[in-house]
Image: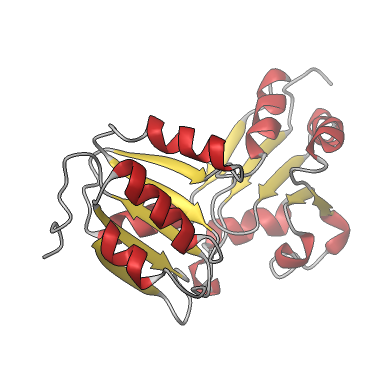
């Protein structure tokens, strides 16, 4: 079989909390794919009845798994790739599988699904005509400070993923580097306790200065030039 014959890689969007958000197209691909590469096979098992088709694919084993993905494609197989939640390729190594498939001449498709980035952004009330997704900030203080400084003059909205244990600390750092801007803290998106908290950076820092907020956090920060009274 020549490279590119038959096989295809399909990136499949899955729910970020509410299982009702699973699309019929996504269900069909996961039902019929020859192999399903999953960031967490235990979570993806909810959507794949035949677990023999499930393979782990994450940051720690991506390099070793890529040859197997290419081998499946060379044999004409359909390989589905999913992340823990949401769209593959957002803060995970899916792009490496895409690159390997394209290098081998195989088609790559995407089945759209929920995304915490987009959900938080469009519901934040902040401008959406221009935005940047920054993902998780670096763990080391120096690298984190440098990253924040890089974005200090950006005029569009900025979206971050932040662990609940770090929200108060990071808001304090952002206030010192980015200045007092409007922000939206989006918590537990699409889940039972979904919550959007909007206000100034200073106000949110004070609110979360002590204690830990529960749940998964997506933070949307207004661009340079937006005042702290934006939501007033």
Q: Quadrant of residue 138?
A: top right
> At 85% from the left edge and 30% from the top edge, which residue is drawn?
67
Residue nearest the viewer, comparing 148 with 220: 148
Residue shown at the point (15%, 62%) measured from the top left: 231
Q: Residue at x 47, y 82 (%)?
A: 192
Q: What is the tally of numbered marks visible in this picture?
A: 0
Q: Relative to residue 111, is residue 204 drawn left or right?
A: left
Residue 182 horizontal/vertical position (percent): 23, 55
Q: Quadrant of residue 142?
A: top right
| Residue 157 % position (x, y) | 29, 44
Query: Quadrant location of the N terminus?
Result: top right
Q: Tell which of 134 and 200 is nearer to you.
A: 200
Query: Which residue: 50% across, 75% down?
Result: 211
**Position of 17 compared to 120: left or right?**
right
12, 218: nearer the viewer: 218
Say above or below: 124 vs 36.
Answer: below
Q: Residue furthest bottom?
A: 192
Q: How is the image coloured?
A: secondary structure
Asked if residue 27 shows in the view, the reply is yes
Question: Residue 125 appears in which quarter of the rendering?
Answer: bottom left
Residue 115 seen anywhere in this rendered image of the structure: no
Q: Relative to 24, say whether 135 is above or below.
A: above
Quadrant position of the C terminus in the picture:
bottom left
Question: Where in the figure is residue 36, as x and y percent of width and height?
Answer: 76, 51
The x, y position of residue 93, in whole percent, is 67, 39
């Amino acid at each position: 079989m020549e490279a590119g014959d038959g096989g295809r890689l399909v990136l499949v969007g899955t729910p970020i909390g509410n299982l009702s958000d699973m699309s019929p197209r996504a269900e069909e691909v996961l039902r019929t794919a020859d192999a399903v590469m999953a960031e967490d096979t235990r979570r993806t098992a909810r959507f794949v009845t035949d677990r023999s088709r499930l393979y782990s694919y994450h940051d720690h084993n991506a390099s070793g798994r890529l040859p197997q993905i290419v081998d499946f494609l060379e044999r004409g197989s359909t390989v589905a790739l999913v992340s823990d939640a949401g769209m593959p390729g957002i803060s995970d190594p899916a792009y490496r599988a895409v690159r390997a498939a394209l290098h081998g001449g195989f088609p790559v498709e995407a089945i759209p699904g929920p995304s915490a980035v987009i959900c938080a952004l469009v519901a934040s009330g902040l401008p959406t005509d221009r935005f940047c997704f920054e993902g998780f900030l670096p763990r080391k203080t120096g690298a984190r400070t440098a990253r924040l400084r890089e974005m200090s003059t950006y005029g569009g909205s900025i979206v971050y993923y932040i662990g609940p244990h770090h929200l108060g600390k990071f808001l304090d750092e952002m206030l010192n580097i980015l200045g007092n801007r409007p922000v939206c803290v989006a918590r537990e998106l699409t889940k039972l306790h979904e919550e959007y908290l909007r206000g100034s950076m200073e106000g949110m820092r004070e609110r979360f200065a002590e204690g830990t907020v529960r749940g998964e956090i997506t933070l949307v920060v207004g661009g340079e030039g937006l005042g702290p009274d934006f939501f007033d």
